[in-house]
Amino acid sequence: MLIKTEDVWKIYKMGKVQVEALRGVSLEVEKGEYLAIMGPSGSGKSTLMNILGCLDTPSKGKYYLEGRDVSSLNDDELSLLRNKKIGFVFQSFHLLPRTPAIHNVELPLIYAGLSKKERRKMAERALEMVGLKDRMWHRPNELSGGERQRVAIARAIVNQPSILLADEPTGNLDSRSGEEIMEIFEELHRQGNTIIMVTHDPNIAARPQRIVNLKDGRIISHG
């Protein structure tokens, strides 16, 4: 089992009020699975994504990644785990604006301590996988929205992570660019990558193998 959560709760304190963002979420994800997480605004989708991506920790419950109890790790251990095991793709790309695509893709490899030669080779390969090798020296403001998202995907996969997390990856794109990005995700899945995608769009959610629906911090169905 790649991912397992057991009765995960996330509770935020806002003054005297407690907000229960997740309420007893238990979820299993197999290696190589392609999963969509759906739900209305405020259902807990992003909170669950942040916990699965080790950007946040549960208030209660357990989270296991490749059998390791993530909920017991400190900040440094979580940071190392994120860098080695998890790739992120966000709706707003999160690219360094004045930095060429190749250097944006190399960033996780710098944190991992790889040599310049290794970084360049791996970053070029990742950009080639998303069809952007001929644009590697372009800066984000010289690229279309779809191309920027391709750079973000290349950065997410350059470390060959165990899991790829995508939060509304087509949300800022026109329909044609969105379709191209979804085709890239499908190809990555065919190559054996585990992908978890948060979306509110039923057309996007129809592409993965399985849909998990959230409402009020609880899983209400496993499609």
Image: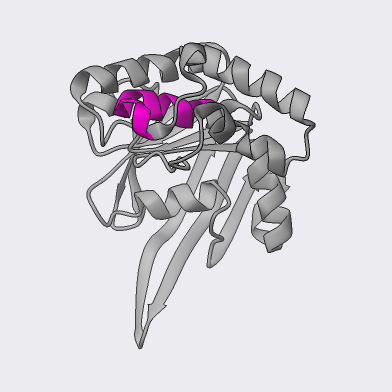
- Residue at x 71%, y 27% (from the top left corner): 119
Classify residue 58 as left or right of residue 178.
right
The total of numbered circles placed on residues is: 0
In the rendered image, residue 158, in percent from the top left (x then y), is placed at 61, 27
Above or below — where is 48 with respect to 17? above
Quarter in which the N terminus is drawn: top right
- Residue at x 30%, y 29% (from the top left corner): 145
Above or below — where is 193 with respect to 221? above
Q: Is residue 82 magenta?
A: no
Looking at the image, which is closer to me, 149 or 28?
Answer: 149
Quarter in which the C terminus is drawn: top left
Q: What is the residue that sits farthest to the bottom in this orientation? A: 16
- Residue at x 60%, y 51% (from the top left corner): 63
Q: Is residue 45 visible?
A: yes
- The part of the chain drawn in magenta is 141-154
In the rendered image, residue 87, in percent from the top left (x then y), is placed at 56, 36
Which quadrant of the figure has residue 162? top right
Q: Is residue 30 visible?
A: no
Looking at the image, which is closer to me, 26 or 162?
Answer: 162
Q: Is residue 150 magenta?
A: yes
